[in-house]
Image (tube, grey):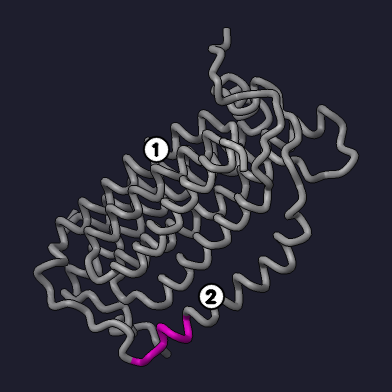
Amino acid sequence: MTLPLPLATSMTSDVPLGWFLTLGLFMFVVGGVGVVVRRNPVVVFMCIELMLNAVNLTFLAFARYQIVPGASTEQAALNAMNGQMMVIFVMAVAAAEVAVGLGIIMAIFRLRNEADLDDMSALRG
Amino acid sequence: MTANQVVFLVLAAIAGLAAVGVVAFGNNPVRAALLLVLNFFVLGFIYFTLGAQLLGISQIMVYAGAIMVLFLFVIMMLQLHQRSPIVEGREGRGVLAWLFGLALAVVVFASVIVPLMSVSGSPIGDEYGTPQSVGRVLFTTYVLPFEIASVLLLIGIVGSILLAKRRL
């Protein structure tokens, strides 16, 4: 039994695909610039999360707006599901990545007691 | 300008400004984290407008809830506010970074988004983003990646405990 939620309509949305893609691109670029500019490892990590979410938004936008020409109805339904599956797996991987990454950051802080990414150059050849 | 477009533009403006704020207020990690929570929360509503109900709810629960709590917890444990503030951008690379970011945005916009600008929505079924339909595909077609993701999460849990413990 499915609840009749008002958000799932069979109508076409009148918001163009390009608007969603533009928002995703904007968030991705801002996150990428933040990774380069910021030197606090926690903030850099947050910017990486921002980039991941921008990609998730793009996946969902492409899943919602089928752009494959001449796809059958079954194929279109499958494509829409594939996009949502990718977002689910990105979320799962991001959760694992955040747990491990923050553990590494805490280990580095305990070891060196400093907060500047630029000074963490122990692996420089 | 229809109602849907107005709703999207308001949500997108909030999300975009919060994203800029994460980078702009990066000197204060708590402020950046709270702005990121706002961004993720609004993004969940944008997922709703895309018809992906289950993912919108999981976005709010997983990202705005769990992951950002983890971030704030680490900021609290590290006591970043008591450390000497990091002097940002002393090599003037901030300008260069924004320049390269702008270049990336222009290239992607011109080559990907402009050709797709006129695409409007194709009709989707009533079951598009419901937990039932997503779960049906997740546990049939995608059952192997699902199991691999669960093993990955287990490894993540064990690994982060190993990293964060002082001694085993």
Answer left or right for B98 relative to A40. Answer: right
Residue at horizontal 55 percent and vertical 48 percent from the top:
A56
Q: Which subunit holds the residue at mark 2?
A: B
Regarding mark 1 in the picture, which secondary structure is present there? helix
- Around disc 1, counting alpha carbons within 10 Å, would you say few (fewer than 14), some (14 to 19), or many (20 or more)? many
Q: Is residue B111 magenta?
A: no
- Around disc 2, counting alpha carbons within 10 Å, would you say few (fewer than 14), some (14 to 19), or many (20 or more)? many
Task: Assign the N terminus of chain B to one quadrant of the image.
Answer: top right
- Residue B21, image x, y percentages: 35, 63
Q: Measured along the vertical axis of the image, is residue A46 above or below residue B145? A: below
In the rendering, which numbered label is found on residue B60? Answer: 1
Start-end of magenta stretch:
B91-97
Count how many numbered circles sit on residues in the image: 2
* Main secondary structure along the magenta-highlighted residues: helix
Q: Between residues A28 and A113, which one lies in front from this camera angle?
A: A28
- Determine which residue is flagged by label 2: B101
- Residue B78, image x, y percentages: 16, 62
- Residue B124, image x, y percentages: 71, 28
